[in-house]
Image (cartoon, rainbow, N blue to C red):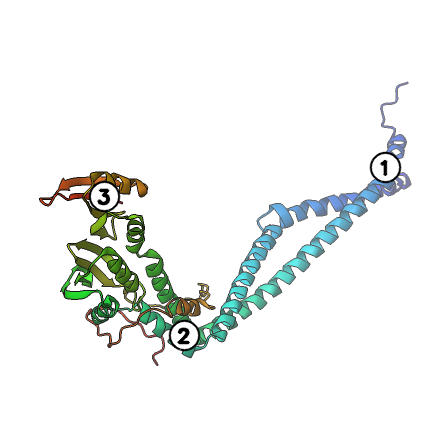
Amino acid sequence: MDSGNSIVKKWLWLAYPGVVVLLMGFSWQWLVAGPDQIWQKIAVKQQNVASQQLEAANLRQKLAILRSQNTDDLKRGLDFLELAVPSDNKVSALLALSRQTAGEAVVINGYKSAGGGGISLNIRLNDLVVLRDMLTRLQQTVPLLVIKSVKFTDSQADIGLEVAWKPAKPVQAEDNKPLPVLTGVVEQLQQKLAAFITPVVGVATTSGETVKADPFSE
Amino acid sequence: MINLLPDTKNIVTNWMRYKGVVGVISSFVLGGYILATAGSAGWWLFLTRQDEAVKEEIGSLTQQVSDLKETEVAVRTVDERVKAVNSVIEGRADPTKLMTLASAQAFEGIKISGWAWKSDKKGAVATVETNDLQLIEIYRQKIKGSKVNSLKRSAEGLWIAEIQL
């Protein structure tokens, strides 16, 4: 009996590494390989947290931009931009601007309607340089005009003209989309177009169906 | 006489030589295990708290952004119109460039009496009149890439050429 106890006592020290090996074996299932895979879950959670932190940072930035905006300034900017490229076809501006840009050396014979909401302007003038000067002035107007065609022959010229207009797209707030940066953009355009010719008469609308979302309406 | 019983005393003595090393290694492994488990649990708790905090922040920020919805719509509307203005400024074709070039290269004896240009076509066609046929070729050579499309003589004896610029 004593001899048996003595042997057990002599081997007892192996119990400690044995327990460690067993612990490691069971833990392997829990931490790495088994269905729980806690390390994998930690990695996934970390990715989620990182993406949410990025989303929060974007929202913070968006909120800061929104708070820095002045709706009156935005409205003034939009009014100016609508003058440059209206959301509907302002044909009377086209007629007024063609008269204003003609100059003394040009006689306007008449207008006729052209496809796409534009007009064809028939003028009488002496030479190509006079025509070029008029075309240059036509390209420096607000609303912006698009010259579609020029035909000059025997001291007569036909100029195909259109007002550059674009219908307003309905715009909605989008939570997950970052805001466009507008700092100085409108001011730059205002500076660029400051010296442009503007029509001296009111600009009537001829086009019918356009969507105009007024973001400032109550 | 042959002794077939195992020499237990010797086996125990042999294994006892590794007792110290095995004990030290086991302690290191156990220590590492405890550290890894505690670290994992701590990291999990930390991430869980961060997750809750960031979710709460996103909720609050979304609400604040939503309160400024009208401003956002105004910003996006202005941006749309800025794009429209820029696309017109950058996209429209300029009919005066070739006119300037053609006028600048004209000289005594050459008259540009006609011009045809379309925004959707490349180049322009200039009608040039002269008394001297050679002048047409001299003029054409002064404008790189140009070519004579047609040439005719009028009843008055003028040479009339259509030059593609």
Give me the chain letter of mark 1. Answer: B
- Residue B43 % position (x, y): 66, 58
Which quarter of the rendered picture does the C terminus of chain A lie within?
bottom left
Q: Nearer the viewer, mark 3 or mark 1?
A: 3
Judging depth in this view, the residue of A136 and B103 nearest the camera is B103
Q: Secondary structure at mark 2?
A: helix
| Up/down of A128 relative to B123, above or below | below
Q: Residue at x 52, y 63 (%)?
A: A55
Three-letter amino acid code at the position of disc 3: Ile
- Label whose residue precedes the other's in the sequence (3 or 1): 1
Give the labeled residue for mark 2. A74
Judging depth in this view, the residue of A106 and B95 nearest the camera is A106
Give the labeled residue for mark 3. B163
Give the labeled residue for mark 1. B18
Q: Secondary structure at mark 3?
A: strand
Q: Residue at x 81, y 43 (%)?
A: B25
Q: Are marks 3 and 2 in contact (CB under 8 Å)?
A: no
- Evaluate whether residue A89 shows in this view: no
Give me the chain letter of mark 2. Answer: A
| Up/down of A166 relative to B164, above or below | below
- Residue A145 % position (x, y): 27, 63
